Amino acid sequence: MLNIMIVGVGGQGSLLASRILGTLFLSEGLDVKLSEVHGMAQRGGSVVTYIRAGEEIPSPLIPMGECDVIISFEKIEAARYLPWLKKDGLVVVNDQKISPLSVLTGAAEYPEDILNKISEKGVKLVAFDALSAAAKAGSERAANVALLGAASREIGFSRESWENAIRNTVKPAFVDLNLQAFEIGYQHS
Amino acid sequence: MKKLMLGNEAVARGLYEAGCRFVSSYPGTPSTEITEAAAEYEEIYAEWAPNEKVAAEGAYGACVEGVRSFTAMKHVGLNVATDLVFTSSYAGVNAGFLIAVADDQGMHSSQNEQDSRHYAAAAKMPMLEPADSAECRDYVKLGYKLSEEYDTPVFLRLSTRISHSQSLVELGEREEFPAKPYVKNPAKYVMSPANAIRRHPVVEERTLRLLQLANSDRINKVIKGSTKIGVIAAGIAYDYAREALGDNASYLKIGMLFPLPTDLIREFAASVDKLYVIEELDPIIETHVRALGIACQGKELFSLMGEYTAGDIRTKLLGTPSESVYEAENVPVRPPVLCPGCPHRGLFYVLNKLKVSVSGDIGCYTLGAAAPLSAMDTTIDMGASISMLHGRIKARPESAKTTVAVIGDSTFIHSGLTGLINIAYNNSPATVIIADNSITGMTGHQPNPATGVTLKNQQTNAVNLEEAVRACGVRRVRVVDPYQTEELERVLREELAADEPSVVISRRPCALLKTFKRGKPLMIDPDKCRRCRMCMRIGCPAISFESGHAAIDASLCVGCGLCKSLCKFNCME
């Protein structure tokens, strides 16, 4: 069974990434379950999407310690969900800082060295600035696909399957841009 | 064709395939997407109604007229609709009538964690609970069959993890369901005491017939595994149990929560060594099992609160803990916040400054309760802001000068109007603020009767809030732009001082709407910043004080200018 989590801050738009993954797994003939967050947390709160694929998926949520890959749109969100990661699992993180309100007001501190702390635990970590990577491809909005590119080696499946999943999910006008963002992300892995 | 669908989308697909023709709902997380998805089907008339009661009554009317109909709501929405629910249970249906209710275990987006399964027993109505998207579709179709076969409205019980999870659905064709003739039948539909007293035995007899169905294997199913452990579960809790225990247990998967089976449970209990009931929230199945004189374990192991996990079930039943390999880093929490440019921010800044007590309500603006705005004292239910303010003023008349109500436009139409009529009728010198952002925000931008657009995106008659308020008997009505904080403050002071009821409409569209004109992001000149932290009082996620002076994140700022209007040193450009 493949267990993937996409985590970030409400409003960052993790929906496209999870749709591409869903399309990919379906095309491979796997059973798929996916769990999203709607409602209040979408207003800048911490959000998580669970994506599971395999022969038969009993429940949409991933138990702690069983996630293969965590894709994080933001640095401290990656740290928040570490208890879900399995031994030797991969964390792909967008090297972006979005401060919660408590940090903005000075009531709490943003742990600037958080990526080091994650590495020190022995976690396999790929961190890069996905926004710049996506901008290079043509639009910051493709950052989520760049992150997918960086996670794709660990998740598996052929390059062709990934590219087809992107082609079948994004609007035709944005296919090339997203394929390019995917490739830039892949280079980071 | 197999398609990955949200549970909510699959419910809508079920409506389509079952030939449903009428859907009316009020938005409420986690139920909202059902009605949005239903509106995508041309064959289905779908609408947003002002509240759940109006929606349910509309849907019931359509069923009495002879077409299959539907309404969806969140758990607390059902509290609003129950007046229709309880008595429609007596009157029964003409064509099938389904009521979906989505509970929110874990309170991801709700003000309480009530267990709506209680309503099924209380209203004596069958309640089905699907465990994935495919079952969502199937149970809608089954629900219509039961509704017509047993002459009863039927509940479909969902929960956040079913509604908002995607799984595979094999799409079927739509079965057209021609409208049944409408035949006048007062003995069935006029629930005067004399008629209702004859319908009650019909309901009791119906429940007995439904019990026979519950004891068959049509809806409640036994899944055989090891007989050392037996688990009775329904819906998402069944999924967790299945994940945790696999073939190490046998299962009685409950598909119909009311009436619960008797013989089937006895047989199942006799076939296993140890029986567990796994259900989130209240011990409804467990109490039923115990009442049958059967020993089981349930709430002594599992919480009455929140969501369960497969890991927890595995630990408790198999003794094999699901282990985290990596500990969480202690990082700052990230609760939701009002968005940059949110029109509610200016309003709550002023209310905080005025140090008034705020009788609050349900919507995005409930976030005004959080620091640093901290401008909400109570939030209980839809419409309570206004009605509670009335009570507070009557209980302590001088509080009229120091207390206001804040309610959104959609919530005001949902159930604020009647409260306002009470204020005018019984003459409280209250100040009611309608935070009018022209949309139902928190649930994801649904139009409402004040928006002037329907669910199917057609222009329509719009409620004119000023006229509506005047028609309720309120003479003092003011309209202010919440970005203009000085004017808003002046108006609020005047209305708080007034000795009669007044309404202040704080009007500006939601900053997330496509029509919102994003301004140029502002910049702060660090040399001009005197570190007074005035701009930090508005709790804008685009402004930080991390580097020892105020700074604006240009990627988040929408240029609303609220901070600029408050800065005494002209730091913002």
Image (cartoon, coloured by chain):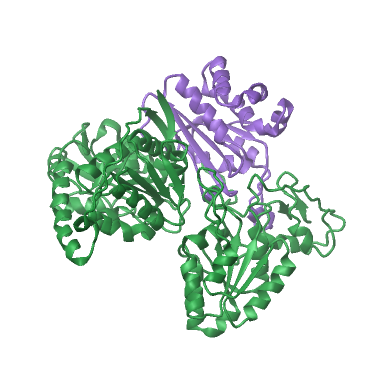
Q: Is residue A123 visible?
A: no
| Front residue (pair A131, B166) | B166
Of all residues, the one furthest to the right in this rendering is: B527
| Front residue (pair A87, B83) | B83
Q: Is residue B416 above or below residue B303?
A: below
Find residue B562 and report its horizontal and vertical position in percent: 74, 59
Find residue B66 and report its horizontal and vertical position in percent: 29, 45
On the rendered structure, is A102 left or right of B43?
right
Q: Residue at x 44, y 35 (%)?
A: B41
Q: Residue at x 55, y 59 (%)?
A: B463
Tally of numbered discs:
0
Color of chain B here?
green
Q: Residue at x 81, y 53 (%)?
A: B524
Q: Is residue A53 above or below residue B263?
A: above
Find residue B227 and report its horizontal and vertical position in percent: 18, 35
On the rendered structure, is B182 left or right of B512?
left
| Front residue (pair A103, B202) | B202
In the picture, one chain is purple; tell me its letter: A
Q: Is residue A11 visible?
A: yes
| Front residue (pair A97, B385) | B385
Task: Give the quadrant of the N terminus of chain A.
Answer: top left
Task: Give the quadrant of the C terminus of chain A.
Answer: top right
Find residue B295 and report its horizontal and vertical position in percent: 16, 50
